[in-house]
């Protein structure tokens, strides 16, 4: 039964992507680009050499981490749109810790830096969770507003207290922090590329989130609070508490993504470091059916799209922003397909059709 | 558009089949109903009644089989198509917008009233007055839905359906949420309307079926197993045909060994959703091993009383002493842990998480217990075993315990909740309308379960509007009126009439008014 549901979900998602791709093809066509060429570049280009593949994975890591957090919050009935701000708080917190404790050995400093990032994000997410639980402030509103605040805080620190002193002296004035001490920088997995050990961290995190949501009592509580708040309350689950916990976790994962970007890719805090991962993570999570097993491939898929978009810009002259259009269309298509995804009747029908109308066993009332 | 086609005089179904995942909901059903006739459709929970009606209304497409109106084959794709041929349905859950008036609600569904940029509300009100006069269904078009009682809303649904041009009415368990008085009233009105209309009437209360219908069809496991003329069959016989065995609702034989006091509620004051005092100095005492029936017209504080006992509503003043411990304003968890069980009124949103599987709903209160978890990891194998045991023990009809609970039929959802609450082994159980919308067989089962646990020393507060149920099961009956217990009397001294008087707020010392003649034969007929 469960396997069927996953296959069905996959099939629907695939169909949805095809529809989205068709719509975007129309757009491409109308701006005078060849849709086929563009898609070929987007999908094949990044995978044509090792470097491309590693770059895809570098993008997939933050998407995966953010997507996991989003899945936790959505499953718990709270719509976290604030990953973008949570990432930035994670960036600030991790950078601050790394720069403040340069003398520590790597085995201590790196975990500490990552933890700081997670805590920074958790704090930012937790505010929205607390506002919702205590004061019934709509979390969509609060997380979006917290995003605005986070951007300003981030900018303020990078241009003020955390600005690299070198920048002041030598002068370009680029708003960025000092380079992190070596002990706070992740190792590379494939030498000569940017692929760092954050990938392993993210994959382990995906496994942990799966275990958390489906194997533990905490996950059960959060899912119950999300799927039927009233019944959960009647059953003695303090729903509000789990909303806050869910937001702490969601923010924590986003903050961790920020810390991983700092320690793995940029090695310092820079402006625009989140580069939209916070929003793309929502698409990744939905595309992955809010399940870690789906979010892993979905994050890789969106990694391909991001890299591919850069390539089309260079080779086919199609603006990279077309990927944003594609993302938007995919969100709309998925949200529209949700009712179909939940329709177990359509699912059963598809499978009956598949198995050639064989009467299914166990068809008892 | 309605005027183009001749009015519906006959609806015929032939070989309607519909599958859901793992369930054959309708299995080659053929039925027929003509104008001037009331067809009652009865069957156990999950027999496929609602599904069949949804197929007629075009909400579901049948896998095979055909529908004929006046002998002509039709394919309905939406309820609009069905209405266009004069078929309308009143669903079990009302489909009215609470903060709109009756007329506005009608206007929502009636295209003729929608002109360019302008909505003809006056026209809607006029239509409503016409129809309500013609069928003697008094309805005020300008009243807001939220101001109306459940019975009045039911009437609005009926009027709305008729205004939309329905001449074949499908009523899916129209009486399950009504008070006995409202039920009598509705049945009487339907009897009067029946000559001009065709009616398909679904109910689990066989005395209503007996009172209203001309013919009766029984569904079992999605197939029609019996067709007959109602006059020829007694309710008890129908019950037996429906379940496959004699149904005798068990009675409380009252071994009269009162246990120690378990729960005592003292001077309880609680505010309702609108801020007024809905419980106003309520006193109640429950002993171990007794069933205390709480009877009353709905809206007199039953709901709030039950919620307060479960810790879901703040106590303004007063005490809830449970084995000497004051539970007032304790958290739901603390109250559950103290040994209280609760069967809430709204099973869909309060009793279960609909998207969770049946087995996950079984552990909704106990997932953190040692039985089902270890070091905060869920013990899936034990959960599965427990689920299979309850499924078998309570005869819950579902394809598997991994099925989403929301997809079960209403009666089976209720069984899931009862199974969970009873299997937890509570010391006291608060049950609100535990058999609402439940078939005779399941009702028999639930009643015997409640009595069983009473014998084992569980104290049960049974809140119900079914006087028959309250009188059958209770040791003592407390009548609630305007947030107070007006009187508590031993069940042996209670009669329908006496309870009726008390429920109207008159104490025994007042001279009893003429007992209103009931439109129904006594439901007691079933267990004679
Ligand atoms: N949307 C659905 N998806 C899957 N299964 C369904 C769905 N609707 C109904 N079923 C199943 O079909 C069967 C028939 O259900 P239906 O609601 O028609 O029963 P019913 O006779 O109306 O019962 P009740 O008296 O409890 O209302 C049940 O086994 C139910 O679980
Ligand atoms: Mg039904």
Image (cartoon, grey):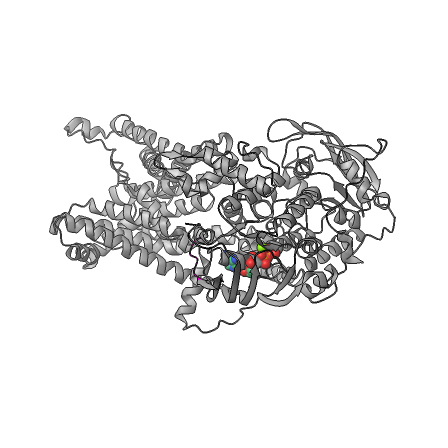
Classify residue A338 as left or right of residue B223: left
Nearer-the-camera pick, B43 or A240: B43
- Please identify the quadrant where the C terminus of chain B is shown: bottom right
Q: Quadrant of ligand 2?
A: bottom right
Vertical relation: A363 (above or below) A252: below
> How many callouts does the rendering have?
0
Vertical relation: B161 (above or below) B36: above
| Visible residue check, residue B127 | yes
Nearer-the-camera pick, B113 or B375: B113
| Visible residue check, residue B409 | no
Residue B39: give x, y in percent of width and height. Answer: 61, 58
Residue B408: give x, y in percent of width and height. Answer: 56, 57
Image point (65%, 58%), residue name: B214
Magenta part, dominant SS: loop
Image point (61%, 45%), residue name: B346
View extreme (right): residue: B256
Residue B475 on the magenta segment: no
Residue A312: give x, y in percent of width and height. Answer: 15, 51
Image point (28%, 55%), residue name: A19
Vertical relation: B312 (above or below) B429: above
Q: Quadrant of residue A355?
A: bottom left
Classify residue B501 as left or right of residue B166: right
Nearer-the-camera pick, A313 or A179: A313
Residue B80: give x, y in percent of width and height. Answer: 44, 50
The magenta-colored residue range is: B74-78
Nearer-the-camera pick, B528 or A175: B528
């Amino acid at each position: 039964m469960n396997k069927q549901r996953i296959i069905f979900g996959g099939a629907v998602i695939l169909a949805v992507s095809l529809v989205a791709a068709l719509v975007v093809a129309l757009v491409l066509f109308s701006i005078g680009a060849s849709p086929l060429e563009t898609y070929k570049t987007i999908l094949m280009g990044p995978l044509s050499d090792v470097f491309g593949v590693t770059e895809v994975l570098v993008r997939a890591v933050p998407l995966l981490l953010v997507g996991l957090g989003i899945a936790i919050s959505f499953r718990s009935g709270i719509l976290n749109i604030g990953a973008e701000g949570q990432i930035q708080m994670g960036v600030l917190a991790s950078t601050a810790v790394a720069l403040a404790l340069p003398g520590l050995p790597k085995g201590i400093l790196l975990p500490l830096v990552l933890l700081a990032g997670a805590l920074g994000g958790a704090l930012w997410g937790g505010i929205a969770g607390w506002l919702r639980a205590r004061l019934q402030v709509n979390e969509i509103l609060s997380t979006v507003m917290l995003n605005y605040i986070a951007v300003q805080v981030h900018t303020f620190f990078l241009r003020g207290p955390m600005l690299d002193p070198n920048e002041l002296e030598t002068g370009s004035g680029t708003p960025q922090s000092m380079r992190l001490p070596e002990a706070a920088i992740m190792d590379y997995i494939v030498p000569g590329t940017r692929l760092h050990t954050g990938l392993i961290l993210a994959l382990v995190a995906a496994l942990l989130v799966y275990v958390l949501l489906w194997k533990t009592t905490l996950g059960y509580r959060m899912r119950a609070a999300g799927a039927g708040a009233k019944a959960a309350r009647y059953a003695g689950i303090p729903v509000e508490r789990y909303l806050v916990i869910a937001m702490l976790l969601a923010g924590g994962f986003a903050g961790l993504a920020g810390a991983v970007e700092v320690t793995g890719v940029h090695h310092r805090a820079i402006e625009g470091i989140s580069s939209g991962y916070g929003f793309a993570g929502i698409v990744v999570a939905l595309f992955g059916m809010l399940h870690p097993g789906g979010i892993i491939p979905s994050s890789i898929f969106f990694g391909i799209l991001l890299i591919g978009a850069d390539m089309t810009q260079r080779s086919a002259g199609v603006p990279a922003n077309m990927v944003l259009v594609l993302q938007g269309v995919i969100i709309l298509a998925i949200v529209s397909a949700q009712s179909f995804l939940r329709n177990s009747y359509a699912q059963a029908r598809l499978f009956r059709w598949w198995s050639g109308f064989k009467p299914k066993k166990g068809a008892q009332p | 558009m309605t005027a183009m086609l001749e009015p519906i005089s006959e609806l015929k179904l032939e070989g309607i089949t519909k599958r859901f995942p793992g369930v054959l909901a309708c299995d080659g059903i053929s039925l027929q109903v003509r104008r001037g006739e009331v067809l009652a459709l009865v069957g156990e929970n999950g027999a496929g009644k609602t599904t069949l009606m949804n197929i007629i209304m075009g909400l579901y497409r049948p896998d095979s089989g055909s529908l004929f109106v006046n002998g002509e084959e039709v394919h309905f794709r939406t309820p609009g198509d069905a209405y266009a041929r004069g078929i309308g349905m009143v669903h079990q859950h009302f489909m009215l917008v609470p903060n709109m008036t009756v007329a506005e609600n009608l206007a929502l569904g009636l295209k003729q009233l929608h002109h360019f940029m302008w909505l003809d509300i006056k026209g809607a009100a006029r239509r409503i007055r016409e129809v309500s006069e013609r069928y003697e269904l008094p309805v005020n078009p300008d009243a807001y839905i939220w101001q109306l009682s459940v019975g009045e809303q039911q009437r609005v649904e009926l009027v709305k359906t008729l205004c939309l041009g329905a001449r074949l009415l499908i009523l899916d368990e129209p009486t399950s949420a009504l008070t006995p008085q409202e039920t009598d009233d509705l049945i009487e009105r339907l009897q009067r309307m029946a000559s001009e209309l065709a009616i398909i009437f679904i109910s689990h209360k066989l005395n209503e079926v007996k009172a209203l219908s001309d013919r009766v069809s029984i569904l079992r496991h999605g197939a029609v197993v019996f067709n007959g003329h109602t006059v020829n069959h007694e309710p008890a016989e129908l019950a037996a045909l429906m379940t496959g065995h004699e149904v005798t609702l068990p009675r409380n034989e009252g071994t009269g060994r009162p246990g120690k006091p378990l729960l005592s509620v003292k001077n309880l004051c609680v505010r309702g959703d609108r801020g007024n005092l809905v419980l106003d100095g309520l006193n109640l005492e429950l002993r171990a091993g007794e069933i205390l029936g709480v009877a009353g017209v709905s809206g007199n504080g039953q709901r709030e009383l039950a919620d307060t006992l479960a810790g879901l509503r703040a106590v303004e003043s007063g005490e809830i002493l449970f084995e000497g411990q004051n539970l007032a304003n304790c958290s739901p968890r603390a109250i559950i842990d103290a040994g209280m069980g609760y069967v809430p009124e709204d099973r869909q949103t309060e009793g279960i998480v609909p998207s969770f599987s049946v087995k996950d709903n079984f552990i909704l209160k106990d997932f953190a217990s040692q039985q089902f978890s270890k070091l905060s990891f869920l013990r899936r194998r034990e959960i599965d075993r427990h689920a299979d045991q309850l499924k078998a023990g309570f005869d819950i009809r579902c394809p598997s315990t991994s099925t989403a609970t929301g997809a079960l039929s209403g009666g089976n959802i209720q069984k899931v909740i009862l199974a969970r609450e009873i299997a937890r082994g509570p010391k006291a159980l608060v049950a609100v309308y535990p058999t609402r919308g439940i078939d005779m067989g399941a009702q028999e089962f639930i009643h015997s379960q409640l009595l069983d646990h009473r014998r084992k020393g569980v104290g049960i507060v049974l809140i119900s509007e079914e006087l028959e149920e309250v009188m059958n099961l209770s040791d003592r009956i407390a009548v609630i009126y305007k947030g107070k217990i007006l009187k508590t009397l031993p069940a042996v001294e209670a009669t329908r009439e006496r309870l009726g008087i008390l429920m109207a707020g008159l104490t025994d010392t007042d001279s009893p008014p003429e007992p209103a003649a009931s439109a129904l034969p006594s439901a007691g007929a079933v267990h004679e």
